[in-house]
Amino acid sequence: MQDKPHPRRHGWRIVRRIGLGLFGLVAVLGTAGALWNALALHHYRSANPPPGKLYAVNGHTMHLYCTGSGTPTIVLESGRGEDFTVWAKVQPMLSRSTRTCSYDRAGFGWSEAQPGTRDANSIARQLHALLLEADITAPVVLMGHSAGGVYIRAYASQFPAAVAGLIFVDASTPEQAHTMPPAVAALEQHSAFEYTMLKSMFALGIVRLSGRCTAVLPGFEAYAGWIRANTCVPSQIDAYRREVAGWPSALAETAQDGPYGDLPVLIFSRDPAQALPHGFPLRVSAALFHRTNLLWDGLQEKLKHLSTRSRRIVAQRSGHYIQWDRPDLLNREVPAFILHIRDGITAPDNGSTRAE
């Protein structure tokens, strides 16, 4: 007489089959998601080739997009983790006054990753090499947003003869390393697990499924194809992670940079009275946000000490991305700044701070 299967053994067999089935389903869905994301990126990149030109810098491709004509050339330096498309609302207008160039730092957009530490000095050297490859040899005006403000300071210190002026757009400063509250500074810190999870969510198409990979903000429609071609690219998580890792060195390297004599300097700062944005991390209270804004405002005022020819404009109703919230302000004031440089004159309101 044949023995009947033991109930417990039979139950484990069912559980194992279910587990293998679920694992197989997850594997199939993951493969499908990864293929979908890869095909979507291929489609958008094929349909929207990079504007401007690609240049070889240190044996790696770098992307530079120049529009307009005239001198001095404005070179736009984006914030950490961002590519040239962040300037969509200002580059077209600024190009009416002079040649204006945006670019992708190594690892972002159409620029290939480069070896080495992603600190301020290395980023400045790579930008300088890129401009030389593009035959932009006359002194330029550097315009840096957020972390880009630290990078352009490193550039001005390493290549002073190549700089005709500096424009800071709610720029980071070396002093923030010991000025900002720890709770705010901690927002920029992420664990290896978090980076891995985010990269996996990009690669497996999970983020694309949410619609965020194809979303385009109002006012960016002309750049829509390029934005979609450079969004949800898994390798850019690695590039961002390397810039975050190099940030302490970037701040330390530029702590002693400046002052720059009578080099023309224009500073745009966010409104310190802005309200706590919707969806801001819950661990940042409205009171802490307000305190941080006031501390940041003080650091912005100190940027005027970088030159005897400096002035500051506080962008009313604007958050950190002034080039998005108040492009009208940049598109009006920057061309006037360029004219002052061309004519060799000092602005009538030199040394002032005003709100607009």
Image (tube, rainbow, N blue to C red):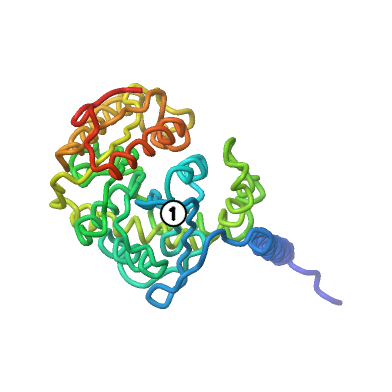
- Residue 288 in the image: state x and y as whole percent: 30, 28
Residue 217 placement (x, y as % from top left): 58, 38
**Closer-to-camera residue (24/277):** 277
**Front residue of 180 and 150:** 150
Residue displayed at 45% across by 67% down = 62
Residue identified by numbered label 1: 101
Work out whether 71 lies above or below 176: below
| Residue 23 visible in image | no
Image label count? 1
**Mark 1 secondary-structure assignment:** strand
**Residue, x 24% and y 41% (percent of image)?**
265
In the picture as drawn, the residue positioned furthest to the right comes out as 1
Q: Residue at x 38, y 52 (%)?
A: 73
Q: Which image quarter: residue 50?
A: bottom right
**Residue 318 location (% of width, % of height):** 41, 28
Q: Quadrant of residue 136?
A: bottom left
Quadrant where the N terminus lies? bottom right
Query: Compared to 223, does 291 lie above or below?
Result: above
Q: What residue sits 26% from the left and 54% below the top?
A: 163
Q: Is residue 1 above or below residue 217?
A: below
Residue 40 or 265: which is nearer the viewer?
Answer: 265
The C terminus lies in quadrant: top left
> Foreground residue, 240 or 5?
240
**Image coords of residue 161 (percent x, y):** 21, 59
Q: Amino acid at mark 1?
A: Cys
Q: Please state if 103 lies on the left or on the right of 340 as rendered.
A: right
Q: Is residue 103 visible?
A: yes
Crowd around label 1: few <14 · some 14–19 · many ≥20 (10 Å): many
In the shown orientation, is residue 208 left or right of residue 181? right
